[in-house]
């Protein structure tokens, strides 16, 4: 098992939802966590709660991500990264009127790809570079582990999810080649494809609860949405279990999404 005590970790999107739960779980294992987010108030709150550090960064910005990596390295040898930052827009590929102008906005498509896919790879390539300079921790030559975050939308993309599904499918697709690339330096890479997780993205109040009740229709068991803590538990396992590598795991209660 990879011992995280005294090490540093980076969690992107760590200010809320899946990222915040993962940051807390890694801190509980002894890691000093750098919370990366664009929401200053939420990121600083989580970092303060777990004794970590907050770095405001756009995951697709090289200089800002390097700053997060350097901050982590000052806190201890960097051994883990979880890329939980992401965005999504619901837009169909074409409009209803048959006009070119009503087709899916190309800049919006590019933005989702930039943040979710390019941003994930940017964080992986830079964090892995820093990890490669650390000393191995065991006889196998292990230096650290990376967990990327896709979505069941990579496989079961719904109507209007083309940009989101494309970005998440790209994350799944690059898992194996990145793992192969990082083999010489002893860094493992795995991907989680979460299903319907109950996070602040769904809002709050009666309307939100009714929406979430409808969402869970395709979950096999248990009959509910997942929790951020259940996601975080898998992320920690993939980081600490030293024989887990190059895998994509659905954490979704057996859901298979319908077209809409």
Image (cartoon, rainbow, N blue to C red):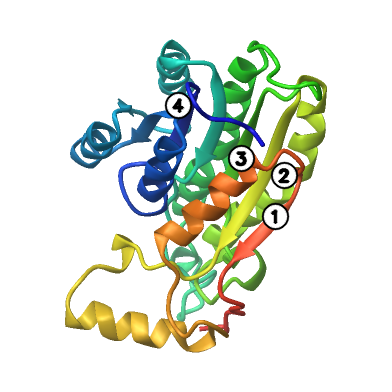
Q: Which residue is mark 4?
A: 61
Disc 2 is placed on an element classified as helix
Q: For the point 30% across and 37% down, which residue is it?
A: 38
The reply to whether dot 2 and dot 1 touch (C-beta < 8 Å) is yes
Q: Quadrant of residue 202?
A: bottom left
- In the image, residue 96 sits, relative to residue 12, either above or below, namely below
Q: Earlier in the sequence, mark 2 or mark 1?
A: 2
Tell us which disc is closer to us: 4 or 1.
Answer: 1
Image coordinates for residue 133, horizontal then vertical, percent: 65, 10
Separation (CA) of disc 2 from disc 4: 21 Å
Q: Which residue is mark 1?
A: 248
The answer for how far apart the CA atoms under marks 4 and 1 are is 26 Å
Mark 1 and mark 3: span between their CA atoms?
13 Å
Cα gap from disc 3 to disc 4, whole angstroms? 25 Å
For discs 3 and 4, the disc positioned in front in the rendered view: 3
Task: Please tell me whether residue 175 is drawn above or below residue 60 in the rendered image.
Answer: below
Q: CA distance from mark 2 to mark 1?
A: 8 Å
Mark found first going from the N terminus, 3 or 4: 4
Residue for point 38% across, 50% down = 21
Q: Is residue 25 left or right of residue 147?
A: left
Check whether the beta carbons of the residues at disc 1 and disc 3 lie within 8 A of each other. Answer: no
Residue 109, numbered circle: none
Q: Residue at x 51, y 77 (%)?
A: 98
- The number of numbered discs placed on residues in the rendered structure image is 4
Mark 2 lies on residue: 175
**Callout 4 secondary element:** loop
Residue at mark 2 to residue at mark 3: CA–CA distance: 14 Å
- Tell us which disc is closer to us: 1 or 3: 3
Question: Which is nearer the N-term, disc 2 or disc 4?
Answer: 4
Q: Which residue is mark 3?
A: 239
């Amino acid at each position: 098992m990879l011992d995280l005590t005294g090490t540093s970790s980076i969690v992107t999107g760590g200010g809320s939802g899946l990222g915040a739960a993962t940051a807390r779980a890694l801190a509980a294992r002894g890691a000093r966590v750098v919370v990366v987010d664009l929401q200053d108030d939420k990121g600083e709150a989580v970092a303060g709660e777990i004794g970590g550090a907050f770095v405001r960064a756009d995951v697709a910005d090289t200089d800002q991500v390097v700053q997060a990596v350097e901050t982590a390295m000052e806190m201890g040898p960097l051994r883990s990264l979880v890329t939980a930052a992401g965005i999504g827009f619901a837009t169909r590929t074409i409009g209803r009127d048959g006009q070119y102008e009503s087709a899916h906005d190309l800049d919006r498509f590019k933005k989702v790809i930039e943040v979710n896919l390019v941003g994930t790879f940017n964080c992986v390539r830079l964090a892995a570079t820093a990890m490669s300079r650390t000393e191995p921790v065991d006889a196998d030559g292990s230096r650290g582990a990376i967990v990327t975050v896709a979505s069941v939308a990579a496989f079961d993309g719904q109507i209007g999810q083309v940009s989101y599904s494309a970005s998440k499918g790209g994350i799944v697709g690059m898992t194996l080649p990145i793992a192969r690339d990082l083999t010489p330096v002893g860094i493992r890479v795995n991907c989680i494809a979460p299903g319907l997780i109950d996070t602040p993205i769904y809002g709050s109040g009666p309307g939100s609860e009714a929406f979430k009740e409808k969402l869970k229709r395709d979950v096999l068991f248990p009959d509910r949405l997942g929790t951020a803590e259940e996601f975080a538990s898998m992320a920690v396992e993939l980081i600490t279990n030293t024989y887990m590598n190059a895998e994509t795991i659905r954490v979704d209660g057996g859901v298979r999404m319908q077209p809409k």
